[in-house]
Image (cartoon, grey):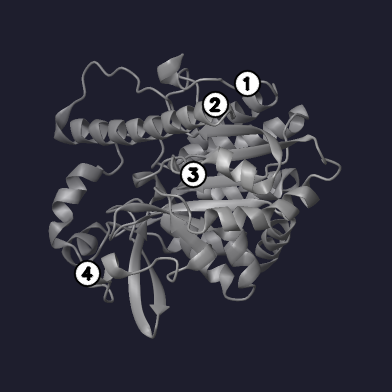
């Protein structure tokens, strides 16, 4: 981690590095905009309930019954998988899922959410165990050159980042194929849901993207938007360039800037304003719900007796901020689970493995994490029932 770029220092330096983007909404236009019109069912804010939620879940009831046949009058088992950010540490989550498959205890997930590196894992976790090898190959074969190339001088002088992610964009295009998007659409039609998180940089709010809906409703153009969302969700500000997503409402075109989902939601299940009891009442169904949270990182920072130099101190501070963000998000999911009678489960990288290589993309480091995740996953029953703060 010592040889990676330091976000705090670069944020300071990049004050002179902003290039000109196509016009965004003005503050007045942003406040006046009905975001239902700016995306509809494709996306919504992650810090409030989705628009028209009750009407939408009523329509979902038939799909849920089809997804879980022979459940009339019975309790329906519903499983949600939430995948966190973590950069190269996503190797752990990929290995864990593959090992969990081998244990024979991995369920089919009704809902999968992913933020940052979790957004890269999410489509393959959503489509199931038959995609384990594809998922493992991403983290086994990827190198730093597959993710970014440095452009420090030009980035600081006239750019919006110090790294070029053209390589990452190409990798996403290789793995997120038209065939994969068609399969996501097919699962969406069955009633299963795939969501990804980006940070709307202009508003600095989490935005949730309904990937299955996009795949189903836009079979030709949707693939480009899905790739954009995955790239944006994994784009660490200043290090990686932000992703511009264009919209048009009433003939007016505007551009939004989207960056790493982990900035506002390192891991996501559902907004606190969503009332699960109201949803159950509207659907007329009974559920036994399970949420499984995979933290692609350590819950606690390892002790450092002598952080050296300005860059070392800044780097450690940045890592601590991101780690505390992830822990706070997991605590939110835990308390929501308690409130809404959902069975909470989580796993993190054990503290015996110091997961400090999230931005390095070192193949040796990543393969060790893959093996560790797979070994833990094979046990089948490896979940903690509380976050680290409650243990």
Q: Residue sitting at 15 percent across and 30 percent down?
A: 309
| Residue denoted by label 2 | 347
Residue 134's x, y, as percent?
67, 49
360 relative to 12 in the view: left or right: right
Q: Residue sitting at 70 percent across and 54 percent down?
A: 191
Residue 46's x, y, as percent?
42, 50
- Earlier sequence position, callout 1 versus callout 4: 4
Tags 4 and 3 touching, CB below 8 Å: no
Image-quadrant location for residue 62:
bottom right
- Earlier sequence position, callout 2 versus callout 1: 2
- From the viewer's perspective, is the residue at label 3 or at label 1 nearer? 3
Which element carries disc 4, helix, strand or loop?
A: helix
Let me know if residue 130 appears in the view: yes
| Residue denoted by label 4 | 28
| Residue denoted by label 3 | 274
| Residue denoted by label 1 | 382
Image-quadrant location for residue 105:
top right
Tags 2 and 1 touching, CB below 8 Å: yes
- Distance between mark 1 and mark 4 Cα atoms: 50 Å
């Amino acid at each position: 981690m010592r040889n990676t770029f330091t976000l705090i220092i670069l944020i300071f330096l990049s004050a002179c590095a902003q290039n000109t983007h196509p016009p965004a909404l003005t503050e007045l236009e942003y406040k006046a905009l009905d975001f239902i019109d700016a995306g509809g069912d494709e996306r919504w804010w992650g810090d409030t309930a989705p628009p028209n939620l009750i009407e939408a879940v009523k329509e979902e009831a038939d799909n849920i019954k089809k997804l879980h046949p022979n459940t009339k009058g019975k309790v329906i088992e519903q499983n949600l998988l939430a995948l966190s950010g973590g950069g190269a540490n996503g190797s752990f989550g990929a290995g864990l899922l593959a090992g969990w498959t081998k244990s024979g205890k991995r369920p089919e997930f009704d809902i999968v959410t992913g933020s940052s590196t979790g957004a890269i894992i999410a489509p393959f976790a959503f489509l199931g165990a038959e995609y384990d090898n594809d998922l493992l190959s991403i983290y086994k074969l990827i190198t730093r050159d597959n993710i970014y190339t440095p452009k420090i001088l030009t980035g600081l002088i006239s750019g919006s980042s110090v790294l070029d992610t053209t390589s990452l964009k190409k990798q996403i295009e290789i793995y997120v194929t038209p065939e994969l998007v068609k399969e996501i659409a097919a699962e969406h039609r069955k009633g299963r849901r795939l969501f990804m998180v980006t940070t709307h940089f202009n508003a600095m709010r989490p935005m949730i993207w309904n990937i299955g809906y996009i795949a189903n409703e836009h079979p030709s153009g949707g693939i480009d938007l899905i790739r954009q969302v995955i790239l944006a969700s994994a784009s660490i500000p200043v290090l990686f360039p932000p992703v511009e997503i264009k919209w048009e409402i009433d003939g007016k075109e505007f551009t939004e800037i989207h960056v790493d989902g982990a900035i506002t939601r390192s891991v996501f299940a559902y907004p606190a304003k969503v009332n699960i009891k109201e949803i159950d009442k509207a659907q007329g169904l009974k559920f036994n719900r399970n949420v499984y949270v995979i933290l692609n990182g350590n819950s606690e920072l390892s002790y450092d007796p002598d952080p050296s130099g300005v860059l070392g101190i800044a780097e450690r501070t940045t890592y601590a901020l991101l780690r505390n963000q992830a822990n706070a998000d997991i605590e939110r999911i835990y308390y929501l689970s308690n409130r809404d009678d959902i069975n909470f489960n989580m796993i993190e990288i054990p503290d015996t493995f110091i997961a400090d290589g999230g931005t390095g993309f070192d193949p040796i480091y990543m393969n060790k994490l893959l093996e560790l995740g797979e070994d833990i996953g094979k046990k089948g029953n490896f979940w903690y029932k509380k976050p680290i703060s409650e243990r």
